[in-house]
Image (cartoon, grey):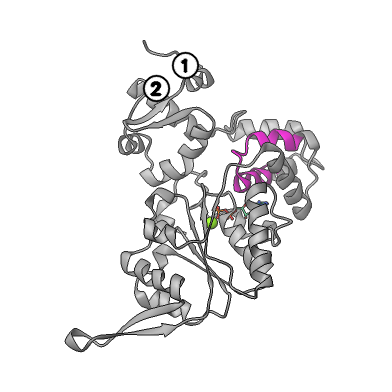
């Protein structure tokens, strides 16, 4: 987690989330991993097949916006395979020895998870190619003319690489993953099921209609759903309510300035900025990011996917534009 990126309360990846206090909410088995049906169906076949052959599962590439369950799924896969789980993130792999240090100590069939794999340094990436393909490490001993490369064998392992930006991953790396899982935003019914499951685990009573309303505001994202559930628990607690009712949710969402489609104030500010300052767009990502006080990464990874999915924003070669739906949603008039 990068503390320097801390901004606002909404960033799914960088804020010190309650997730860390609620590890209990993380599904351990594929059967508890709700939603993403087609992805799960295929993956369970590949897991079973690898187990039956007593082989390491093929390398797995997970793509999707923050909070959809990439880290969770990697852990679930290790659990289902009954193997060790090692986790790191690309920015933490600074030097070849950082990667070598991990790969030379993994046990056979270990699931090795690298988060934000689009941020790998080229030298690490090249080391990884050989490790993924041949289960060997190229290691340079000595310096200058006397330097030579030795190959160190490592146990067969499964690399799980996760990214929010598949477009920034090099094609040689992508080509070395045998299985690709692309996450989509969750169906509302799946988010409801996740909310009920989390409520059960946290010992919260959550009314059916309250869950439905909450699911509408959760941006199709389990992490957001769990976070909202905890906030509603806070609101319920101070009013000494025994369960989270629809009224509590509706008041709570209003207090958090989250609207009926799950937009937070900052989402609306972004759309309003494009409309008011850039006549609806197109405006380049850099310009837009500066205007709304975000980094391009945060804008692209966190805000845009959901706005695009909701049909409120378009990404065009010339920049970002709002749609007619945006004007309607914000109650603003279109310039002519
Ligand atoms: N399919 C799922 N079913 C139930 N809970 C989930 C699911 N996917 C994610 N979660 C919950 O959402 C939180 C965020 O998931 P995480 O794996 O950290 O997302 P990502 O790594 O994609 O950013 C987890 O702590 C977990 O509790
Ligand atoms: Mg993650």
> Sequence order check: which comes first, mark 2 or mark 1?
2
Front in this rendered view, residue 203 or 311: 311
Q: Residue at x 62, y 30 (%)?
A: 254
Q: Is residue 211 left or right of residue 275?
A: right
**Residue 85 coordinates in the image, percent (x, y):** 59, 71
x, y percentage for residue 331?
Answer: 51, 17
| Secondary structure mostly seen in the magenta stretch | helix
**Residue 203: image x %, image y %?**
79, 52
Instruction: Tell me if residue 222 is in the magenta stretch.
Output: yes
Badge number at residue 332: 1
Does the image show residue 283? yes
For label 1, count other residues whose C-alpha is less than 10 Å away and answer few (under 14), some (14-19) or many (20+): few
Residue sitting at x 74%, y 31% = 247
Disc 2 residue: CB within 8 Å of ligand 1: no
Considering only vertical position in the picture, is 72 above or below 35?
A: below
Circle 2 — which element?
helix
In the rendered structure, does residue 193 fall within the stretch colored magenta?
A: no
Q: Which mark is residue 275?
A: 2
Q: Answer whether labels 2 and 1 touch (C-beta < 8 Å).
A: yes
Residue 79 in sight from this viewpoint: no
Q: Can you say which quadrant of the picture contains the C terminus?
A: top left
Q: 254 or 228: nearer the eye?
A: 228
Residue 315, above or below 30: above
Residues rendered magenta in the picture: 210-232
Residue 333 x %, y %: 45, 13
How many other residues sit within 10 Å of disc 2, few (<14), some (14-19) or many (≥20)?
many
Q: Is residue 179 left or right of residue 236?
A: left
Compared with 212, 4 (above or below) is: below
């Amino acid at each position: 987690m990068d503390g320097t990126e801390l901004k606002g309360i909404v960033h799914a990846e960088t804020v010190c989330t309650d997730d860390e206090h609620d590890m209990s909410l993380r599904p351990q088995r594929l059967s508890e991993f709700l939603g993403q049906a087609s992805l799960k169906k295929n993956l369970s076949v590949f897991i079973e097949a690898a187990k039956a052959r007593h082989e390491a599962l093929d390398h797995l590439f997970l793509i999707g916006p923050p909070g959809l369950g990439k880290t969770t799924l990697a852990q679930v896969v290790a659990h289902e395979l009954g193997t060790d789980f090692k986790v790191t993130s690309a920015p933490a792999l600074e030097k070849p020895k950082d990667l070598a240090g991990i790969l030379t100590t993994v046990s056979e069939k270990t699931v090795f998870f690298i988060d934000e794999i689009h941020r790998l340094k080229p030298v690490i990436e090249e080391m990884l190619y050989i490790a993924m393909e041949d289960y060997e490490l190229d290691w340079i001993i000595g310096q200058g003319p006397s330097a030579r490369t030795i190959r160190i064998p490592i146990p067969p392992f499964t690399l799980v690489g996760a990214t929010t930006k598949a477009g920034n991953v090099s094609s040689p790396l992508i080509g070395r993953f045998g299985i690709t899982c692309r996450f989509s935003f969750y169906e509302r019914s799946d988010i409801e099921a996740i909310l009920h499951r989390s409520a059960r685990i946290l010992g919260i009573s959550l009314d059916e209609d309250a869950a439905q309303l909450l699911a509408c505001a959760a941006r199709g994202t389990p992490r957001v759903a769990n976070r909202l559930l905890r906030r509603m628990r806070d609101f319920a607690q101070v009013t000494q309510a025994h369960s989270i009712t629809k009224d509590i949710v509706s008041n709570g969402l209003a207090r958090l300035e989250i609207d009926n489609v799950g937009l937070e104030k900052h989402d609306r500010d972004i759309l309003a900025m494009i409309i008011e300052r850039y006549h609806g767009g197109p405006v380049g990502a850099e310009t837009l990011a500066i205007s709304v006080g975000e980094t391009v990464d945060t804008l692209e990874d966190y805000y845009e996917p959901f706005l695009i999915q909701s049909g409120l924003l378009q990404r065009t070669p010339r920049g970002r534009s709002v749609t007619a739906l945006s004007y309607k949603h914000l109650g603003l008039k279109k310039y002519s």
